[in-house]
Image (cartoon, coloured by chain):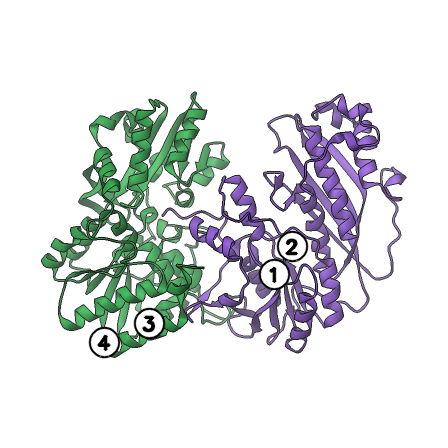
Chain colours: A purple, B green
Amino acid sequence: MTDKLSILGWTCPRPLQNYPTIVMGHGAGGKMMADLIEHLFAPAFDNEWLKQMGDATALKLPDGKAAFTTDSFVVSPLFFPGGNIGELAVYGTVNDLAMRGAKPLFLSAGFILEEGLPMETLGNVVTAMAAACDKAGAKIVTGDTKVVQRGHGDGLYINTSGIGVIPAGVDIGPANACSGDALLVSGTMGDHGISIMSVREGLTFETEIKSDSAPLYGLVEKMMLAGKIHCLRDATRGGLATVLNELAGSSNVGIEFDERKVPIRPEVNAACEMLGLDPLYIANEGKLVAIVPEDSAEEILSAMHEHEFGMDAAIIGRVVSEHRSLVTAKTSIGGMRVVDVPAGELLPRIC
Amino acid sequence: MKYLDEYRDAGLTRKLLADAQNIISRPWTLMEVCGGQTHSIIKSGLDQLLPPEITLVHGPGCPVCVTPLEQVDKAIALASLPDVIFTSYGDMLRVPGSTRDLFAVKAAGGDVRIVYSPLDTLKIARDNPGKTVVFFAIGFETTAPANAMAVVQAKAQGLTNFVVLASHVTVPAAIAALMDSPDVQVDGFLAAGHVCTVMGFWEYEPLVKKYNVPIVVTGFEPVDLLRGILKCIRQLEAGTHTVENAYERSVSRMGNKPAQAVIQKVFEMTDRAWRGIGVIPMSGYRLRPEFAAFDAELRFPELQAIETKESPLCISGLVLQGRRKPGECPAFGTECTPQMPLGATMVSSEGACAAYYRYGRYSFPSPRAAPTKGERVMKRIGVRFDDR
């Protein structure tokens, strides 16, 4: 998906080829903007709802509770090993829906483009978004484009909102954790953050560390069939540690886990050791944390192992009634420690 | 991970703990000098596993914590200048100055950049000939060689827009100052393994003779720390006091000669103020006169007019001398948290207060039902609330 594509592949590239880069006119609401929509966005995201081309899109939702979410994407660089901003913008939002058990259906896409952004880059991002939508089973049904002056943006920002439907009987939410529940993660922690950092800082490792960017509803669907789920969270910004703290706070429970059971790739661990970072705080884009009743944990784990995005899933800990709102970890030498939320930006250690 | 997992091994840890328990006959107080060791101890939970006779007190070896407020304020003043690109190790950005920190300067439009190596700063200087690029050269003997090398290379490359704000400190002078202080009761030292990797440990030999304390060069992983503690306890129980090396895989007696040579070439010894502690004679490095062209304080003489103002609540100086534990500070966890630090010890990934706050609040009931975080830690370390 990260392969460089040529804009020559589109239905009628001529009007866009006249402008190899984004100019202010592409956001001015006139002919140039219409060209951008007609020759880039519309063919890439093509679907019956988008074709309505109204100020708003009329949708008919299946029965059930609707879930609605939004997220903005400002990643730099735009392309990185294992993904790109377009994929993230789709998967980030569909995953937020999936974490309530909602099947993602419809997305909006708002683009803020910086004057001077190569048209080819935008084309590659949009193509990646279209492919990501196919993979996630969601449709982009409405959108918006704005252009800001050069120097006022980082190339390209994307906001996506998403609507999904929660099947009857499903109640997954951050306040549902109960004492005794089991704590699961769907795979290795920290891949995305370290991938981005390695590109940004120009660090190279023997093995390339790829982002784990992936849509998770398929996995969630399998898990829901295998047993009851109390809480789901995708462990994005702030990583596993931050998500666990949020869950402990929302459910007013304590959470305990064993550091040694958390799956972490050796190369991610090595990079973290070198940079003075803790993999528990590093972002993921295709991993979830699940809290489930103890008696269904093993079945849910087996179901996860059968899915391509849950092959490394593991039970790492449990929910306890002690130290409410606090997360603790059993350390590698058998000690205990608090796992706190980071104060702000992760800072590399001095020496 | 190879070379790490074996030093975090639960079985080996248990064996070393049993060895320590078997030989110990009475209470001993050890100081781990380096903040990196403090964090490793608290993060691994080693402090809870040690025999109760052993008390660990945390030393002054956090480079971020001891960098004097005056230098932090100078950094903030420099970073605020329009034609300056200010570069620093990441840890320093959240350290509170008298009125704000470097993050606040960045948010207000200052060009503040985190670098992993001071040599990265030289590239920034080459790429920005119209700007003056200032590097915040702080730290112990560990960071000094790379910082010195940046100055040497800048001179060789004829860079005129690169200067350093130097605030280097050295370990042996701090150990001597602690032992000279009547309030400090330390039976033995765990010397900082990384500092000794650069400097060797011959410098500590006069100290053990003068002060009759064992000094054991110690690494940073739990098993490294336990081996250092065990060697120290053995000496204390036997009544000996020598320098021992428990970090053999990294440290030799004479250390890294080329690294020492570049320090010598660029820096000379000077009296240096340590934040919260005061001026320790001949405890720091400053640029030699032949490198004066790279001295930010000479390039920007207006820096000398800076007035500093330290938080009246913060007791980080006492914490850095091992005279107080973080939880004994009434501001700990209340007025002072990693989000709103009053002192540098609450900021750095090597600061003792930050270590206690992040990892050390483990066995207490819900914050809603309990006293303040400070009081909970005080309870844990045995200070009664009415003792305050």
Of circles 4 and 2, which is in front? Answer: 2
State the residue at coordinates (70%, 69%): A303
Q: Are marks 2 and 1 in contact (CB under 8 Å)?
A: yes
Mark seen at residue B24:
4
Badge 2: residue crowd in 10 Å (few <14, some 14–19, many ≥20): many
> What separation in Å lies between label 4 and label 2 (alpha carbons)?
50 Å
What is the number of the mark on residue A18?
none
Q: Chain of mark 2?
A: A
Residue at figure coordinates x 23%, y 76% from the top left = B24
Q: Quadrant of the C terminus of chain B?
A: bottom left
Residue B116 versus residue A182 in the image, above or below? above
Give the mark, 3 or 4, whose residue is nearer the N terminus.
4
Q: Work out how far the residue at label 3 is from the one at label 4, CA to CA, in angstroms.
A: 21 Å
Is residue B234 found left or right of B3 in the rendered image?
Answer: left
Q: Which residue is mark 3?
A: B382
For the image shown, how many numbered marks are present on the structure?
4
